Image: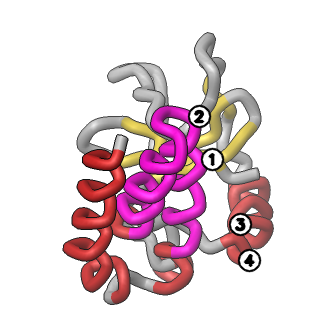
Amino acid sequence: MSKKILFAGAVLVVLAPVGAFAQSGGAAAGATTGAVGGAIVGGPVGAAIGGVTGAIVGGLADQQQPQFRQYVVTQGVPSYRYQEEVRVGATLPASGVQYYEVPQQYGVTNYRYTVVNDTPVLVEPGTRRIVQVIR
């Protein structure tokens, strides 16, 4: 147990400067998402590592989510029906899903968005992995 805590501390020390240089909005949202996911999988150590990893990955800041959700609604994007749980880390199918560019004003142009089960999500284009669920 103590080795895991020491390892997590070392990872945090190494990755903290990288997280500090990430965009503040995306980093905050990513850190929160990563910490929650990490806590579920690995307890307190997982939360610490997940939070740092999430901060590096980024996403929309909490205050941007309602505005982005409204933007998606006005675009009239059709919803894809997905049989699995819509969650961060889920990989969408290779066909049948339409992806759209995120406007520059949101600062996450490296992702695409789509609507899955009536919920907007940000997706990593190369892997089709959901990186953020917009509530």
- Is residue 81 in view from this perspective? yes
Q: Earlier in the sequence, mark 2 or mark 3?
A: 3
Helix, strand or loop at label 3? It is: helix
Distance (Cα) linking label 2 and label 1? 7 Å
Distance (Cα) linking label 2 and label 4? 20 Å
* Label 4–label 3 contact, CB within 8 A: yes
Distance (Cα) linking label 4 and label 3? 6 Å
**Which residue type carries mark 1?**
Val
All told, the count of numbered labels is 4
**Which residue lies under the disc numbered 4?**
63
- Is residue 122 in view from this perspective? no
Image spot of residue 5 (x, y percent):
35, 53
Image point (46%, 21%), residue name? 96
Residue positioned most to the top: 83
**Which residue type carries mark 2?**
Arg
Drawn side of residue 103 relative to residue 2, left or right: right
Region rendered in magenta: 28-55
Eyeballing the image, is 117 above or below 120? above
**Which residue lies under the disc numbered 1?**
133
Q: Which mark is residue 11?
A: none
Magenta stretch, main secondary structure class: helix
Instruction: Identify which residue, 100 or 60, lies in the foreground.
Output: 60
Q: Earlier in the sequence, mark 2 or mark 1?
A: 2
Q: Earlier in the sequence, mark 4 or mark 1?
A: 4
Drawn side of residue 17 relative to residue 27, left or right: left
Quadrant housing residue 116: top right
Q: Which mark is residue 87?
A: 2
Image spot of residue 132 (x, y percent):
55, 51
**Which residue lies under the disc numbered 3?**
65
